[in-house]
Amino acid sequence: MMQVGGVYLNDAMTRFDFEQVSSRYVMLVFQNDGSLSQDQYIQVAGVKLFGTRVPPAVPDEFVTFDCDAPILEEKNYFLLPGRTLSITYENCDDMLTGFGEDERVSTGSSEIVIPWSDLSAGTPTHIDFYKSGMGENEYVTWNLYQAVEDSSTSSFELHSTEEMPLNLSGSEHSLNVVTHDESQPFIGVCNMPEGDHSFSSSTFTVENTGDVRAGVVATTPATDAMTRFNNTQAENDEIGNLLVADTFMAIYSEFDPTHPELNVLGCNDDRTSQLGTIYDGVVLATGWSEVTVSLEPGTYTLVLMAWNASPQNQSLGASIFSSALPIRQAATVGLWGQAGVLAPLISDSSLGEVPQVSAGLAQTGQDSNSILLFGFLAVLLGFGFVLIRSRIKK
């Protein structure tokens, strides 16, 4: 407070950070702080209220939860950077938002709007849905995370991406993992289930010593984290039967499919980077593999294989896929290297395709090249027969 010509002026400013509401009532109380004598009075000439209005977040991602849905299970949702999520809920008594200490949202509302900045990358924000008639401890949880860009490749340059199929059949695309002087089968330092595993391989060349990283960045059919969120539990159980849903990756100095435990330089079963990592807009699944190794100049083999033995992954239902017949499964693998480490990719991949068999038709084993060759030989034989007959007539 300062005095100007016998008049006391209070030039202090108090800042209030109000929560976002539709309206706010403010009451101002003036009281002598002791600097004025008791026989004087406080005259208020004017008070100025000013501030800024934060516009409400506009959602650009929308999901709905129905408490009367037949299947209720815990799920992980990853919100992309800078985006805002709208959760609409139906047929729910109330719900626990996870923002604050057991804060419950009024049942008069049917939507929660959550900006990306309100979530955490490493710790989930829980949204618990209570179904009508459920007990206090009976609820369904969604774990919400910030999705974050993949930082593990920040010091690397993307060299290439390659689609590597994992077949359901074909002995030439299957390797056998057995126990070799260990209580558990191992490939390098990584344990593996014993049995036959589908695989694909590809070679690459290192020109200069440095670190190389390989990792699954997409799959066909889709098995990424957000696909699983949008599916029912039954559909996700079916996805779990896919070879590409749970992969294993290893880098070899020399690769021998009959002895996959030898010459392993690095291996990985499940990704070790942060939950909710995104690459090229895809939220990577934890069951996808990635491996980083330091390599000297030379040629190496990258091998992608199914974690589970193949017979465990051949029972495909028809709820997601159009047919229970074997479908094409492939993983897109990214290859990164420090600057100047990797030479242009040389691929000798024996990748193969899953036979596409139409319903009701038996597989003959003939391919298009065989049919063309057979037709060509038939034409030649026919021409020779006509020529012989013409000579006999003479």
Image (cartoon, grey):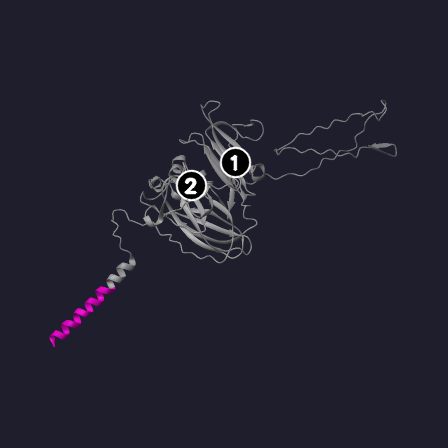
Q: Which residues are magenta?
A: 376-394
Q: Nearer the viewer, residue 275 or 117?
A: 275
- Few, some or many residues within 10 Å of mark 1 (<14, 14–19, 20+): many
Q: Position of residue 327 (x, y in %)?
A: 34, 46
Residue plotted at (48% across, 50% down): 334
Q: Nearer the viewer, residue 360 or 132?
A: 360
Determine which residue is flagged by label 1. 144
Number of numbered discs: 2
Q: Position of residue 201 (x, y in %)?
A: 41, 51
Q: Position of residue 37 (x, y in %)?
A: 86, 24
Is residue 381 covered in magenta? yes
Residue plotted at (55% across, 51% down): 156
Q: Earlier in the sequence, mark 1 or mark 2?
A: 1
Q: Point out which mark residue 186 bears.
A: 2
Quarter of the image with the C terminus in it: bottom left
Which quadrant would residue 321 be assigned to in this image? top left
Q: Amino acid at mark 2?
A: Phe
